[in-house]
Amino acid sequence: MGANIDLILKIAGVGILTAVLHAVLEHAGKKEQAHLATLAGVAIVLIWVVQLLGNLFDQVKSVFRLF
Amino acid sequence: MAALEIVQIVGLALVAAVLVVVLRPLRPEMALLLSVAAGVVLFLLVVDKVAAVVGVMRELAGRAGVNVLYLGLILKIVGIAYIAEFGAQVCRDAGEGALAAKVELAGKVLVLVLAVPVLVAVLDTLLALLP
């Protein structure tokens, strides 16, 4: 049960961190690095979400005998 | 206790909703990913209950002599409908109404494809009854 809430908080943490990093880098004049940092953050969260979706589809496949 | 389960689920949903609202102005794509992740987590909390109910249904159908094939078909259709609905809802949240409509269309077509054999079976039995 605990693991679920951790994942949501982890994703939110990475999201907020990316947003702040983007703002800081933009303010410091390094616009390219800012976009790269945002891209990295989105990529990390995307990997987690895709793993989660894979898990969901496996569960649905097993429960509803969809194979 | 099932009653406590709903409290946990609603708590999780509220936390996720607040975090999505925080993230939306800063990084809209993160907010979308967070809402998808929260949706999946909430379903994973409930899926073992769904599995238990499906097991009981299957056992009752077996006892009642209902052909397991049809129950399997119903479960398949429910599974397809759920996944199509999940995908369509995520697309709609992201503001892509057109994509959501396409996903729903695909879901309907797939369910139809599964339902056609049953229709044929029903028609055959009806024709057999007629004099």
Image (tube, coloured by chain):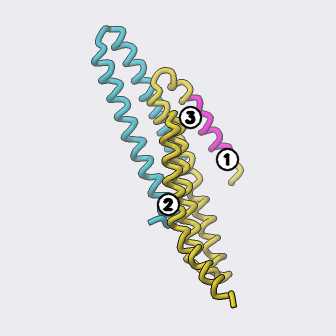
Chain colours: A cyan, B yellow
Q: Residue at x 54, y 29 (%)?
A: B19
Q: Earlier in the sequence, mark 2 or mark 3?
A: 3
Query: Vertically, is A26 above or below B64?
Result: above
**Magenta stretch: dominant SS?**
helix
Q: Which residue is mark 2?
A: B110
Pick whichever of labels 3 and 1 is earlier in the sequence.
1
Q: Respond whether the residues carrying marks 2 and 1 are from the same subunit.
A: yes
Identity of the residue drawn at 49% across and 60% down = B110
Q: Position of residue B96 (x, y in %)?
A: 49, 36
Task: Look at the image and say whether residue B7 sits in the magenta stretch.
Answer: yes
Q: Nearer the viewer, residue B58 or B76?
A: B76
Query: Where is residue B114 shown, x and y percent of the image?
Result: 52, 67
Pointer 1 local density, CA inside 10 Å: few below 14, some 14–19, many at least 20: few
Q: Earlier in the sequence, mark 2 or mark 1?
A: 1
Do callouts 2 and 3 point to residues on the same chain? yes
Percent position (x, y) of residue B93? Answer: 54, 36
Q: Please state the chain letter of the residue tagged with numbered disc 1 in the rendered image.
A: B
Where does the magenta region start and end? B6-19
Q: Locate residue B17: give its quadrant.
A: top right
Which of the pair B103/A46 is nearer the observer? Answer: B103
What residue appears at the point 62 percent right and 76 percent down from the top-left corner? B59
What number is the disc on residue B16? 3
Q: Residue furthest bottom?
A: B131
At label 3, the amino acid type is Ala
Quadrant containing the N terminus of chain B is: bottom right
What subunit carries mark 2? B
Q: Which mark is residue B104?
A: none
For the point 45% across and 34% down, the residue is A10
Amino acid residing under circle 1 = Ile
Q: Which mark is residue B6?
A: 1
Magenta segment: does it hold B111?
no
